[in-house]
Image (cartoon, rainbow, N blue to C red):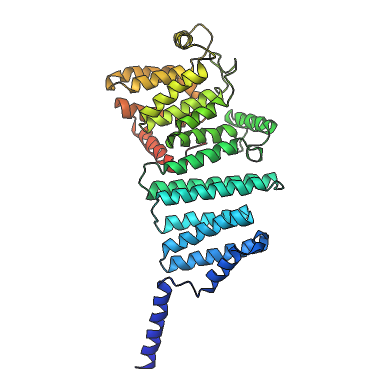
Amino acid sequence: MSAAAARRRKQQKKRAEAKSGDIDNDPVQLRLDALLVDPTLTEESVAYEALQLAQSAVRRNVKLCDFARATDVAFSTSLTLLAKSGRVSVSSQLQMVLVQVLVETHTECTDVWVRRFGELDAAYRTALDKDASMNPDERGRLQRLHLQFLKKGLKWSNDLGTVQFGALGLHSLLADHCWNMSCDEAVVGTEEERKEAAAKIAAQNEGDEDDEYEDEDLDIGLRNEAVSHYALAEKVSTILDKLKSLPAPSAEEQKMGHVCPPAQRDALLTRSILVLLAIENLRDARTLASSFLKEIENPGRSEDELKKSYLDKTDGKAPSHIMFNCMLVRICEKDVKTAPLFTWLVRNFGAELGTMYEPEIIKTYTTKIGRVYFDIQPPPSMMNMMENMMSMMGGGGMGG
């Protein structure tokens, strides 16, 4: 055998050994395994070394086309960094690597992976809450990073899973995180800061300011996103519990022709039911409307009073959200012949819908409902917007 042939044979043998996944002799993996059980992992420098080693191991396994091992290393190391070192900032970087590799390697979204995302989410929140000395700005930043991680994970589950709009478990995780963020002053600021931000947005909408103002951190935006994902996760009981925690509408919010946004409780109810109807989940929409009417609304105003007030234009009260939703659900339970009634109902409630958060998205939902249940075809421009909005339910962004 010639020297050149011997070298080629030796190289082929090395490549075969590498592709076999034999990591017993891989110094990077050996060092990483040692660090993950080392008591000094709680030190920042040690945690960062583990991060760098894990990133290297992930890249190596991807290069060898051992995608399962690549994702396993990213997951297990992220979880260990959270559970044993409490280094949320370090782990968040590796979690982004994990979701990136899941997408790039076209790894299928399975129930196992959905449970793994749940484990990471629980460990992340536990580690974050344990660090009482963390700067509020840093806490807010890490909350936003985790939000992006969950959104990317949801989009991956939509693209490479079997459930339309993404895995229900990931919708539930994202909804919980959005709601928790909406209650975290490190994210939404103090009550005084929120009022100042709301005033700035109102001024911008009136054209008084040219600068753009990012409002995705406002509590109402996060809560709108939360209930939307709860609806997609089929968590009607959770939506109901969240709505029970919110105050009843004020006199100003119930006044006919009010210019202020509707009460959060009412607006979030309407948003939830519109999402449920738009994805053709009539069963849960019916359950949510009837449960809200019985458990939340009735102690304040009776159903007969609400029905009378809804059609009475002289009592000085704005049409109630719960009656609009109950009527909408009942109409959707009938056939396409009730299309004129649907059109009248939406037009009659249009002023109220126009004061809700992101009215253009609300219009997209009502357009989709009209098309699905009553065969009302929107104009081409609205059709494109509707299709884009529905595609965003799978993690591409839902507003808020």
Residue at the bottom extreme?
A: 2
Can you say whether 333 is above or below 311 in the image? below
Name the side, left or right, on which 379 lies relative to 116.
Answer: left
Q: Where is residue 3 shown, x and y percent of the image?
A: 39, 92
Q: Where is residue 321 shown, x and y percent of the image?
A: 48, 19
Res 82 quadrant in image: bottom right
Q: Nearer the viewer, residue 178 or 216?
A: 178
Residue 145 in view (yes/no): no
What residue lies at 49% left-to-right and 37% top-to-bottom? Answer: 399
Q: Where is residue 199 shown, x and y percent of the image?
A: 64, 29
Can you say whether 315 is above or below 84 in the image? above
What residue lies at 42% left-to-right and 79% top-to-bottom? Answer: 14
Can you say whether 152 is above or below 242 in the image? below
What residue lies at 34% left-to-right and 34% top-to-bottom? Answer: 380
Name the side, left or right, on which 207 lies relative to 362.
Answer: right
Number of numbered discs overlaid on the protein picture: 0
